[in-house]
Amino acid sequence: MNKLTDEIEEFISSHCQEEKARFDEGLISTIYEIKGVRMDELSEFAKKLALSNPRIEDFPLRCHEEILIAGITLAFSKQSADKKVKQIQKLLPYIDNWATCDLICLRLKKMESQKQFFVNLLKTKKPFYIRFGIVWLMKYALKKDLRGTVNLINDNVRSTNYYVEMALAWCYSEALILDYDYMIEFTQTLPRYVVRNRTLQKACDSTRVSSERKKEIRKLRSKLLGMEI
């Protein structure tokens, strides 16, 4: 074992909580053991590791938390966007659940120059590669070019995997909040019932949508479900 492995093992051992692990196991489906470390503590630890810009191949990747530490450390590191992409490619095969995917992806700031990498992930057949691409584009491209980003995602994603469709609904509901008129029309054209329905549901659940618009959305959702109200 190397020094980094020893340091990570010591951190996880001293911060794992059985109750947190059991709770996370109820939310996350993964082949990796879950130790139960709080995200705020894990993130602070990763920030410290990021100061030395370690490589993905230097990390132990045997449990859920070790994979998270590797990804979040990479996100916080000062490496160039180009180098980060090469490291992400090495980490992606270990990402097998929504939590690892989203918690790492949402922290990947200042990578706009590598947008095409995330777009290319949409075209793969691997669900969590696709979700990774959707979530990054939602976080870092949607506000800059909402209509272009929405149509780019819609044109490239073909997977009907549950976690992909939930990411699509999340992205489209965020877009609906930002550009209501355009997205209300767009949502009605979505061929997939699950994505369309969950997009409208998520918008209704948002505190950023006015009560008046929520009434309109609920009415449309009921109409699309064949249940006039």
Image (cartoon, rainbow, N blue to C red):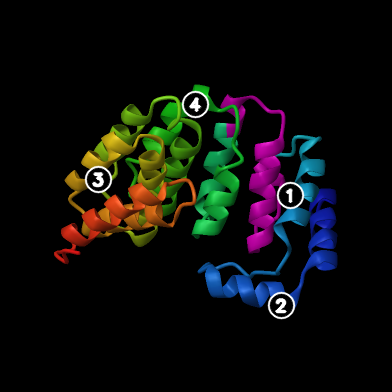
Say which of 155 and 80 sits in front. Answer: 155
Q: Amino acid at mark 1?
A: Ser
Question: Outermost residue, top direction?
Answer: 113
In the drawing, what numbered circle is on residue 19? 2
Alpha-carbon span between mark 1 and mark 3: 36 Å
**Of discs 4 and 3, which sits in the foreground?**
3
Say which element carries label 1: helix
Determine the image quadrant of residue 23.
Answer: bottom right
Q: Which residue is mark 4?
A: 114
Q: Main secondary structure of the magenta part?
A: helix
Alpha-carbon span between mark 2 and mark 1: 19 Å
Q: Amino acid at mark 4?
A: Gln
Alpha-carbon span between mark 1 and mark 4: 24 Å
| Mark closest to the chain's N terminus, 2 or 3 | 2
In the drawing, what numbered circle is on residue 187? 3
Q: Is 91 within the magenta? A: no
| Mark closest to the chain's N terminus, 1 or 4 | 1
Q: Which residue is mark 1?
A: 43
Say which element carries label 4: helix
Q: Amino acid at mark 2?
A: Glu
| Mark closest to the chain's N terminus, 1 or 3 | 1
**Of discs 1 and 3, which sits in the foreground?**
3
Alpha-carbon span between mark 4 and mark 3: 28 Å
Q: Amino acid at mark 3?
A: Thr
What percent of the width, then of the height, locates residue 172?
35, 44
Is 28 left or right of 137, judged from the image as shown?
Answer: right
Task: Tell me the quarter of the image containing the C terminus.
Answer: bottom left
Q: Is residue 126 visible?
A: no
What percent of the width, then of the height, locates residue 28?
54, 67
| Mark closest to the chain's N terminus, 2 or 1 | 2
| Mark closest to the chain's N terminus, 4 or 2 | 2
